[in-house]
Each structure stands twice: as C-alpha cells, then as structure tokens.
Amino acid sequence: MPWNVGVLGAGPGVAALHLPVLGRLAELFNVVHIADAGSGRAEALARTCGGRWSEGEAELLADRDVDVVAVCSPPAEHARQILAAVAAGKRAVFSEKPLATSREEAEEVVAACRAAGTILLVGTNHLFDAAWGRAKHHLLALEGRVQTVSVTLALPPNDRYHRLVAEGGPFQPGRRGRPDLHDPAVAAGVLKQLLTGLAIHDLPAVRDIAPSIDEVVYARIVPPIGYLVGYRASGILIQLALTMLPLGPDALWRLSVATSHDRIEVNFPPAFVHAGSAATRVRSVDGQWTEYRRDTEDGYVAEWRLLASLLAGAAPVEYDELLADSHYATDLADAAAAKVLEGVPL
C-alpha cells in the first residue's frame, strides 16, 4: 500500500515539481490532502490528484489519513510546521529547503523528530542526483586533493525568485518596488535569503567536500538579483555566483570541482524542469573530457524514493547529517551577511 501524503503549500514548487513526481511514484505515495495559506490554489491542485483540500494547516494535520506531511510553505514556516507535524503524530515529514532559518530552530526540529521517531528528509535534490553521486565517487577514487569548488547559477527572470528576496522582510523598496540594495542592511538580508533559498540546493554537496567553514573572504549582492560569495572551508576556496539579468540568460546551474588531478563539472537541469539527472564530465590533465552517462530520473524523484526507503526501514534517518547541513547553510549565510554589513561595496 502506498503512503498517504498531505502537502502544506500550493505554490509553483508543488504544482510543477512534487505533484508530478508523486504521480510517477503512485506505487509508493498517494496525495490525499493539500492545504494552502488562503490563496485558494489548493482546491485546483487537489482535484488533479483526487485529494481533499483545506485552508491553513490544522485540518490537514488532524487528517488521520495523512501519513507523510510535505512542508512546501515559505522558509520561515518550515520549522514551526515540522514541529506541528511531529506533535500531530505523523509518521514522516518531507521538508523543502531550508530545514530552518536559524541554528536554534534546526536543533529544536531535529531533536523533536529524533525523540518522536519521526522520519525527516530535506529536499536538497542536487544531493540525491545520481550525477553528483558519480562525481563524489570519482573524487574518492582518485584521492586527488580538492583545490577549488565553484557553483555558478545563471537564471532567467522568474517571479518565484523575485518573491524570494521579499520573504521574511519587510525590506524598504527601491526602484520599481524592489528592495533597496544600496542599503547595506537590506543587501545583507537579501543575500542571506538567497543563500538559504537558492545556494542551499548545492551546499550539502559542497559540505561533503569541504565540511568546515573557515572564513568568508568576500560577499556581494549583484543587482538586480544576484550574489558573489567566496569563502574558505577545510582549506578549500569556494565561490558561489548567481546572476539574473533583465533579458534573461540561458539557464545554467553548474558545480565545478578542481583537484590536483583534473576538473569535474556537474551541470544540473534548471529548477522546475524534469530532464533526468545532471550531466557530469571530467577533464583530465591532458585536456581530454570524459562524460558520464545520465540517468532518466532526477534528484526530485530520487529524494522521494529515499523517503520511501526510510519509511520501509531500509535506510536510517541521518538526523546528524540533516542538522549539520542546516548549520552549514545558516552559518554561511550569517557570515556572508555580516561581511556585507562590514561595508564591502556592491
């Protein structure tokens, strides 16, 4: 019998990502309830999968048919709703990233889930992409010393990302109603939210390579929406870059790792796109490229398959890793925001 899922949230991520994925995994999961925060979108989405709909979270959490709660609400709501799902006795919680917005929240959430035996999984889909698994295996097999890591995002204009910088405000609007990025406090807040909302896709994978943050070297917001952050972790120089141009660049989402032996590139499909796994290739010292095969399933499917394995008892819940991933992201975001507040120019 499939596990019954209740979804808290009815935004683009639910419509474009999770519902199609769960529809492909009908032997494992069945969406029985969707709740929105008053937008009215839950009804239309629930009708597509034959589920119930409601407004707010209370009715869904009280629904005895719901085994798994998918927390797909704005980031500021994640920790509170996970705790509410644990208190409601739900078997498992799938949370969109980030797990929490502070160290304290993350520790409270993980402790509550651990104490109650609630299965917890955070949807950092790039970490579960088969292409990243192959790249990590390559790094381990070569035993080459990692020298640099870079994550580069070039994204076309998208209302989802524009709204991201306003979540958790309020920020004083600048021209065209956008946040005034010339105000250091505003720029620091926007940078923190972009790192915990977009860079966090890749930070768990980066932590696999460089687990200990040493220092943030530079951190800048790049108007209209973007950032450039450089930091050292475990002695490795890491650069995170995001650009969103008004005319819209071709989408690019690339994680590159340079070692003493070669360079590895992992090119992920754009967010909200189901195009199979990332494409991985390796450039050796003689300039030759080797490309790894791609899987038909992407990280979105892989993360839900992992949740099914956790529910079946076939894999352990990695509470410590989830907490460490959350701490890594919030610590980096806090340090980068502090660097902006030191007066680093835009």
Image (tube, rainbow, N blue to C red):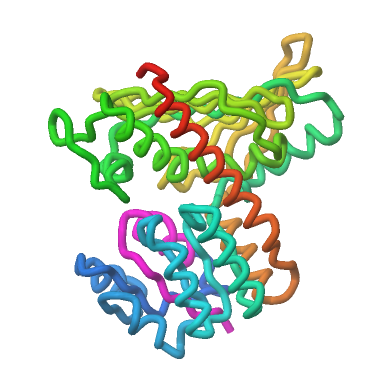
Q: Is residue 12 magenta?
A: yes
Q: Residue at x 39, y 21 (%)?
A: 343
Q: Residue at x 61, y 63 (%)?
A: 305
Drawn side of residue 18 relative to residue 232, left or right: left
What is the span of residues highlighted in magenta in the rendered image? 1-22
Task: Give above or below for 240 relative to 273.
Answer: above
Q: Is residue 86 magenta?
A: no
Q: Position of residue 329 (x, y in %)?
A: 55, 44
Task: Give above or below for 68 relative to 25.
Answer: below
Q: Position of residue 90 (x, y in %)?
A: 53, 81
Between residues 159 and 24, which one lies in front from this camera angle?
159
Can the viewer see residue 193? Answer: yes
Q: Position of residue 106 (x, y in %)?
A: 55, 59
Can the viewer see residue 23? Answer: no
Q: Quadrant of residue 281?
A: top right
Task: Give above or below for 236 relative to 15.
Answer: above
Drawn side of residue 280 relative to residue 337, left or right: right
Between residues 23 and 118, which one lies in front from this camera angle?
118
